Image (tube, rainbow, N blue to C red):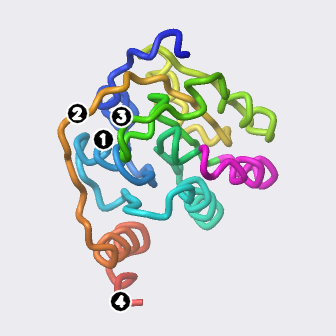
Amino acid sequence: MSRANTLDRRAVVRSLLARRGGLLLVTGLGAPAWDATAAGDSPLTFPLWGAMGSAAMIGLGLALAQPERAVLVLTGDGEMLMGLGSLATIGVQRPANLALAVLDNERYGETGMQETHTAHGVDLAAIAAGCGFAQSETIRDMAGIEALGARLDARQGPLFAQVKIAADTPPLALPPRDGALLKNRFRAALLGPQADLA
């Protein structure tokens, strides 16, 4: 069981995005997308409304396609557990501009708060380290979050952070639900106004 899962998820995400600049953000489905929206919706955010287990791979593709841009994948422990193989692929590709932050409340928040495997000792940070991430850590305090935020633009990755958050359910802050709109606004913000016509 958890030792100290007390971090507030919304405060964590606000801190990570406080100096966002041109950071490209991919959010896993559910609460991470809502947390990012609560911190301020942006056209440089690509929230997933489905495709559970795919956030890290979408972030990898984006990081490889845009090596001069910092890319952050913000997802949950349940989504990360479903896509563990992506950590091995990222470890082999080693994109320096990619960071993954897993908001780990040790629960499947979208289906009833059932415990995930991280509640029983599965160490995602150790798995990422074993896959070859340049830096991998478990964060339990806001000082660690602030340090991670400062490293996001340094492009010394891939970085992995398992962030131990409290198992709470803050109010919904939903991003747009139209997939085509999300894709087009992200492409336009990243590539210019003509990109949404392609």
Q: Earlier in the sequence, mark 4 or mark 3?
A: 3
Which residue is tagged 4?
197
Categorize mark 1 by other alpha carbons within 10 Å: few (<14), some (14-19), many (20+).
many
In this rendering, the label closer to the viewer, 2 or 1: 2
Q: Which residues are magenta?
A: 81-96
Q: Earlier in the sequence, mark 4 or mark 2?
A: 2
Q: Position of residue 1 (x, y in %)?
A: 55, 16
Q: Position of residue 195 (x, y in %)?
A: 39, 82
Is 4 placed above or below 116 here? above
Asked whether disc 2 touches disc 1, contact meaning CB atoms under 8 Å apart, the reply is: yes
Q: Earlier in the sequence, mark 2 or mark 1?
A: 1
In this rendering, the label closer to the viewer, 1 or 3: 1
Foreground of the two, 80 or 43: 80
Asked whether disc 1 touches disc 3, contact meaning CB atoms under 8 Å apart, the reply is: yes
Amino acid type at mark 1 = Asp
Amino acid type at mark 2 = Pro
Principal SS element in the magenta part? Answer: helix
Q: Residue at x 24, y 57 (%)?
A: 175
Q: Earlier in the sequence, mark 4 or mark 1?
A: 1
Which residue is tagged 3?
13
Q: Residue at x 38, y 35 (%)?
A: 113
How many marks do you count on the picture? 4
Q: Residue furthest top?
A: 3
